[in-house]
Image (spheres, rainbow, N blue to C red):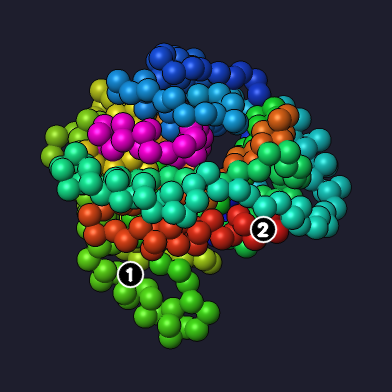
Amino acid sequence: MDSNNFSDVYGKYDALIAAGSKHQLHATIGTAFDELELFRQEHQGWLFGFLTYDLKNEVEELTSANPDHLHFPDLYFFEPEHLIIIKGDGITIISANASAILYQIEKQKIRQSLPSPGIVLQPRFSKEEYVDSVDQIQQHIVRGDIYVTNFCQEFYADGAEIEPLDIFNKLNALSPNPFACFFKHKELYLICASPERFLAKRGNKLISQPIKGTAKRQTDPQLDEQTKQQLQSNPKEQQENVMIVDLVRNDLTHSAKHGTVQTQELFGIYSFNQVHQMISTVVCELDENISTVQAIKNSFPMGSMTGAPKISAMQLMEQYEKSKRGLYSGSVGYFSPDGDMDFNVVIRSLLYNAENKYLSLHVGSAITYEAVAEQEYEECLVKASAMFEVLGS
């Protein structure tokens, strides 16, 4: 996990590297959160892992029937044998073999980057199909079924052969974001350049920072600044953002002490290599009767990847999307021994199954009544641009 030198008041580490497993949990939809609760009670040190988007089917009475070509576990966590914590100029190694690990680090040589694999990802939707789907989704908005939704599409490659760590290093150099992550579980890989925090706990405070609102960076500094200002004042982007902020506020009330939920920042503009993003920050004080695992469940899946009303939006997207989201729209993160936690939103990511050589990239955008389908399609391509580039598409 790499924060790429982005720092805010809630960031605790520059990087975390966890390897090996003393204990691990594989859980399936139905009892996954209960199993994670018990696993956390039994292992109160460091835990790392992920939750897939389709755990929504456990949180609510929902189903997923779209095809899954990646086959990630629904939920997976492990207690690491070895942990490296990097903060500023300090490095802490927690391991029974810390001296051996330090020796191996000192022996490492800088690895040369491999040539681009030249993989072209195929779309599940043609542009015409995507535009037609957005038009149909907007009819649901007109009827009042939903107000906003996150509509996602997949780009994929069969028979893809990549070196996942090399691709991650290239992506992290091209698009360094504060919640970047490389996760290997057997033959399954997450290559993640996420800019978004789902949920963190710091002391007795919960923090969620939903992203809604995207604008492409410009090479000309003056035009780039104009683009940034236009994003901040754009009524459509503000509407998307505030609807999701309201949804996140509602989610947090299920874990908060009464009257403590507040929007700490609304419509903040943050700049990354490819895009400017509109990010808001919602916080609350955690009810002492609510565990960290329960707090995650109470807000899962994150509002920025669902829509409002949340259940209706998730139901509709199962109808209109063509593939199972899996770990995309899910979350990767950690629990620490001091009771804190930090989890990202899995976006701007490649997912890879090395056994069946299936490579997947999902991207999505918010669909509102005012959304223009062609512009939403182009926004998806902007969000995917760094992943396309490192693959040589």
Q: Where does the magenta region start and end?
A: 310-335
Q: Is residue 304 left or right of residue 337?
A: left
Considering depth in this image, is 12 or 256 the residue closer to the camera? 256
Q: Is residue 95 left or right of residue 360?
A: right
Q: Position of residue 169 (x, y in %)?
A: 69, 53
Q: Is residue 158 above or below residue 121?
A: above
Q: Give residue 105's position: percent from left, percent from top.
A: 79, 45
Residue 288 visible in rendering: yes
- The residue located at (33%, 40%) in the rendering is 306
SS for tag 1? Answer: helix
Q: According to the image, label 2 marks what residue?
A: 393
Query: Marks 1/2: CA distance?
Result: 28 Å
Q: Classify 71 as above or below 168.
A: above
Can I make out residue 286 in this image? no
Residue situated in front as seen by the camera: 150 or 137: 137
- From the viewer's perspective, is 239 left or right of 352? left
Question: In the rendered image of this protein, does residue 38 appear above or below residue 51?
Answer: above
Magenta span contains residue 331: yes
Label 1 CA crowd tier, 10 Å (few <14, some 14–19, many 20+): many
Amino acid type assigned to the residue bearing label 2 in the image:
Ser
| Residue farthest toward the left in the current orientation of the protein | 259
Decide which of tag 1 and tag 2 comes sooner along the chain: 1
Q: Badge 1 is on which residue?
A: 231
